[in-house]
Image (cartoon, helix red, strand yellow):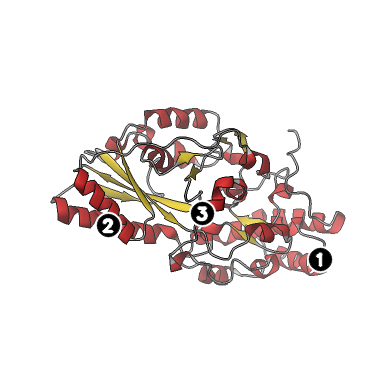
Amino acid sequence: MAELARRIKQWARELGFQQTGITDTDLEQAGARLRAWLERGFHGEMAYMARHGTKRYRPEELVPGTLRIISVRMDYRPPEDDPALRLRDPAAAYVSRYALGRDYHKLMRKRLQKLARRMERESGPLGYRVFVDSAPVLEKPIAVKAGLGWMGKHSNLVNREAGSWFFLGEIYTDLPLPVDKPVTDHCGRCTACMDLCPTRAIVAPYLVDARRCISYLTIEHPGSIPEALRPLMGNRIYGCDDCLLACPWNRFSPTTKEADFLPRHGLDKATLLTLFGWDEKRFLKRTEGSAIRRIGHQRWQRNLAVALGNSTRDEAVIEALKNRLKDASPLVAEHIRWALARQLEDGGQVNSNQPLPSS
């Protein structure tokens, strides 16, 4: 089994995974943290986080017979990229770095299936199931136990050699492979991620209130974005990377070797006005094969309206908002009216790092 584990890690490297670790199925501590997080309502509208009961932290209940979990990571940071420069330009549309290229789910799932089939050819028939950000799987606690990194205060995985710009995937298997040791936490006294979070969503070390998180608001949240949070979103229209940009360990992060993760359709250079001009047909065409498509055209327009409201006063912006208002859905229209009021009354563009107003 030790030799097989070594070979699995070698095969994983050949398939483009930068690191592989193996752990057992004991996730009870992570389960306790999950339950406490859910009890505080920090998951917001993400009802799926509360479904499936204990299956999320008891892998053998989700996939009977599971003895070990193989955890892998794959780098996605694009080369020649300056996210901070984009965030300082109020006319620029900021898309989280992970979503600039093709959807990672399919690519990684196919690679993991290849790895699992290679394992099966070597070991004979085995039980397994592949996951990439799918089903009730606690991928970050699993990766921590497998030695791929430690949980940072922003609740993302951090690796000493690679920072945090990577995707995770898993194989649940019934092979009794030897397990790897976790690494120690190296956040120390640093609170850079907490200090830089635009909406103060990291309410305590290692604790995120998703309801205040820009990634949640622009991707997971289906309805109206709370008005108190809109000015703090700046020009972020899909996701947010601020806590990763703040982390000192990301100075060591390598760029991706996967062509599929490179920016497509100029999303890394697009302006807010250009993207706001996409009708639904163009949105679906330009986001084909992208993780962005899952939010749909309505949320896309909603997010862009907020960002345009935060941009500097511009007659072209005002005109575009007025034109879109004519046939906008009630949800989008609400955010367009807010954006117009910002443009017409105070010119938009506030300090994206100001503290939240008291509730």
| Vertical comparison of 140 with 219: above or below | above
Disc 2/disc 1 C-alpha distance (Å): 54 Å
Q: Amino acid at mark 3?
A: Ser
Dot 1: element: loop
Q: In the orientation shown, which residue stands out farthest toward the right?
A: 345
Residue 336 x %, y %: 72, 58
Identified by mark 1, the residue type is: Asp
Front-lying residue, 273 or 155 = 155
Give percent across and percent down for residue 282: 56, 72
Q: CA distance from mark 2 to mark 3?
A: 23 Å
Q: Pointer 3: residues within 10 angstroms few (<14), some, or many (20+)?
A: some
User: Residue 95 appears in which quarter of the rendering?
Assistant: bottom right
Tell me the residue that label 2 is attached to. 11
Regarding residue 200, the answer to whether it shows in the image is no
What is the secondary structure assignment of the residue under circle 2?
Answer: helix
Q: Position of residue 24 (x, y in %)?
A: 29, 36
* Residue placed under numbered mark 1 in the picture: 314
Q: Is 105 positioned to the left or the right of 267 in the image?
A: left
* Residue at screen point 78% across, 68% down: 319
**Image-based side of 136 in relation to 119, left or right:** right
Where does residue 128 sit, x and y in percent of width and height? 24, 47
> Is residue 335 visible from the viewing direction of this image?
yes
Q: Quadrant of residue 89?
A: bottom right
